[in-house]
C-alpha cells in the first residue's frame, strides 16, 4: 500500500507540473499575440524618424569641376505612418537618390570672386520625396545648405619627370640622362591644381644590379581630379661599363689683374674621371678645362688656391683633379 501510494503521489506531481508548463505557454502565446496586434496598430499611427540616405550628383557643367567634395549622405527627417518608415528602414542596401545639378536652382555666394554657389536643401524636398516613393513627408534635410565650389577645367602640356633610381653593378654606370617617350603630356583638370604643377611624375621604380641599358614602360601618377593624355611613358636608361681615364691638363688663369703676374705651382695637373669604355679614347680630346679664377680667389691669403672645372661633358662622371689646390706667387708688373 505504501508502494502504491508513493506511485500515485509522484504521478499527481507530474500531472500538476505539466499543467503549469501549459499555462506558461498559453500565457506567452497570448502575450505575443497582443504585442503583434499592438505593434500593427502602432504602424498606422504617425511617427517621426530621421535617416541618413546616400545621394549621388549628376550632370555637372561640362567645363566645370567640383573643387570640394559634396556630402555623400543627407540626413532626412521623416514624418508619416509607421509602416511606411519601417519599410524604408528595412530596405537594406539603399540606392542613392539622384540630384541633377543641371536642374537645381543654385545661387552664387555673395561677395565671392570664385565660382562658389549654394542651394538651400529644403527646396530639394519634392525631388527627394518623388525618388523615395514613401507615404511620408520629409520635414527637414540636413545639412540645410549645400555649397558647390566649382573650378574651371583647363589643359596644358607639362614635362614628365622620372622617379627612377638605378643602382648598377660595380664598373657600370648610367651614361647621361634618362630618355622619356613622350617627354611631356597634356593634363586636364581644375585650374587651381593645374596652375601649381611643374611636372608630372612617374611612379617610383627602383632597379638594382643593372649591367646593361634598359627600357621600361612606367605608369604616370595622375593628380587628383585630373586626367592625362598618356597613362604610361617609355623610360630608356643608358647603362655602360665604365673605366677610369687620366690626362695631364694645363691650368688656365682667368681674370688676372693687369697690374700683376700670377704664377702657380704646379701649372699642369692630372685629371681623372670615369668614362664609358667606348669613350675612353675620346677623353684626351674633350674640351673641358681646369681653371683658376683670380677674381674669386683670395690673393691676400697664404692658403693655396682651389682649382675648378669648366665645360665638363655630361657623360663624364666622378671628375677630379690632382692636386686640387695650387701654390701661387704674385709679381707686380713694372711700368
Image (spheres, grey):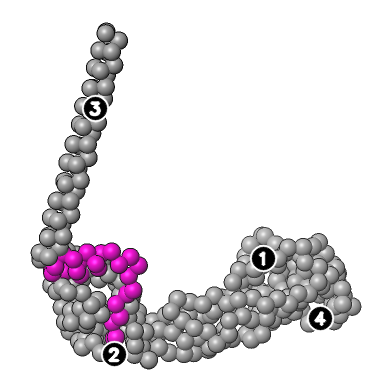
Residue 244 part of the magenta segment: no
Q: What x and y, as percent, mark residue 234? A: 67, 81
Q: Looking at the image, is mark 3 or mark 1 nearer the viewer?
A: 3
Disc 4 element: loop
Question: Is tag 2's residue or tag 1's residue first in the polypeptide sequence?
Answer: 2
Of residues 277 and 152, the one drawn nearer to the viewer in this rendering? 152
Q: Is residue 204 visible?
A: yes
Q: Residue at x 64, y 86 (%)?
A: 182
Q: Is residue 120 visible?
A: no
Q: Looking at the image, is mark 2 or mark 1 nearer the viewer?
A: 2
Q: Are marks 3 and 1 in contact (CB under 8 Å)?
A: no
Of residues 226 and 141, the one drawn nearer to the viewer in this rendering? 141
Quickly name the residue at label 2: 102
Q: What x and y, as percent, mark residue 120? A: 17, 79
Question: Is tag 1's residue or tag 4's residue first in the polypeptide sequence?
Answer: 1
- Disc 3/disc 2 C-alpha distance (Å): 77 Å
In the drawing, what numbered circle is on residue 15?
3
Quickly name the residue at label 4: 286
Residue 317: quarter of image: bottom right
Residue lying farthest to the top in this orientation? 2
- Disc 2/disc 4 C-alpha distance (Å): 67 Å
Of residues 100 and 131, the one drawn nearer to the viewer in this rendering? 131
Q: What residue span does the magenta drawing correspond to?
A: 76-102
Left or right of 211 in this view: 130 = left
Disc 3 element: helix
Disc 1 element: strand
Crowd class of label 4 (few under 14; some 14 to 19; many from 20; radius 10 Å): few
Quickly name the residue at label 1: 206
Residue 86: quarter of image: bottom left
Disc 2 element: helix
Question: Is tag 2's residue or tag 4's residue first in the polypeptide sequence?
Answer: 2
Amino acid at each position: 500500500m505504501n508502494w502504491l501510494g508513493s506511485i500515485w503521489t509522484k504521478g499527481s506531481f507530474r500531472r500538476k507540473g505539466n499543467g503549469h508548463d501549459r499555462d506558461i505557454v498559453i500565457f506567452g502565446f497570448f502575450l505575443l499575440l497582443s504585442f503583434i496586434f499592438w505593434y500593427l496598430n502602432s504602424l498606422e499611427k504617425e511617427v517621426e524618424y530621421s535617416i541618413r540616405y546616400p545621394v549621388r550628383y549628376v550632370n555637372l557643367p561640362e567645363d566645370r569641376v567640383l573643387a570640394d567634395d559634396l556630402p555623400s549622405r543627407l540626413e532626412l527627417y521623416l514624418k508619416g505612418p509607421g509602416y511606411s518608415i519601417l519599410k524604408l528602414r528595412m530596405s537594406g542596401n539603399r540606392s542613392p537618390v539622384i540630384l541633377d545639378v543641371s536642374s537645381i536652382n543654385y545661387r552664387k555666394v555673395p561677395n565671392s570672386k570664385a565660382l562658389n554657389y549654394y542651394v538651400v536643401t529644403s527646396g530639394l524636398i519634392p525631388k527627394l520625396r518623388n525618388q523615395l516613393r514613401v507615404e511620408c513627408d520629409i520635414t527637414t534635410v540636413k545639412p540645410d545648405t549645400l555649397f558647390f565650389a566649382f573650378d574651371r577645367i583647363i589643359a596644358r602640356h607639362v614635362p614628365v619627370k622620372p622617379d627612377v633610381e638605378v643602382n648598377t653593378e660595380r664598373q657600370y654606370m648610367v651614361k647621361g640622362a634618362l630618355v622619356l617617350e613622350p617627354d611631356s603630356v597634356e593634363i586636364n583638370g581644375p585650374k587651381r591644381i593645374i596652375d601649381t604643377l611643374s611636372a608630372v611624375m612617374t611612379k617610383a621604380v627602383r632597379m638594382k644590379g643593372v649591367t646593361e641599358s634598359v627600357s621600361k614602360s612606367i605608369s604616370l601618377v595622375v593628380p587628383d581630379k585630373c586626367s592625362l593624355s598618356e597613362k604610361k611613358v617609355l623610360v630608356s636608361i643608358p647603362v655602360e661599363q665604365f673605366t677610369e681615364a687620366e690626362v695631364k691638363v694645363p691650368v688656365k688663369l682667368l681674370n688676372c689683374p693687369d697690374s700683376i703676374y700670377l704664377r702657380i705651382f704646379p701649372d699642369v695637373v692630372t685629371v681623372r674621371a670615369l668614362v664609358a669604355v667606348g669613350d675612353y679614347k675620346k677623353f684626351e680630346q674633350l674640351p673641358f678645362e681646369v681653371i683658376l679664377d683670380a677674381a674669386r680667389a683670395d690673393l691676400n691669403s697664404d692658403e693655396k688656391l682651389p682649382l675648378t672645372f669648366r665645360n665638363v661633358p655630361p657623360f663624364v662622371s666622378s671628375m677630379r683633379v690632382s692636386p686640387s689646390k695650387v701654390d701661387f706667387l704674385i709679381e707686380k708688373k713694372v711700368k
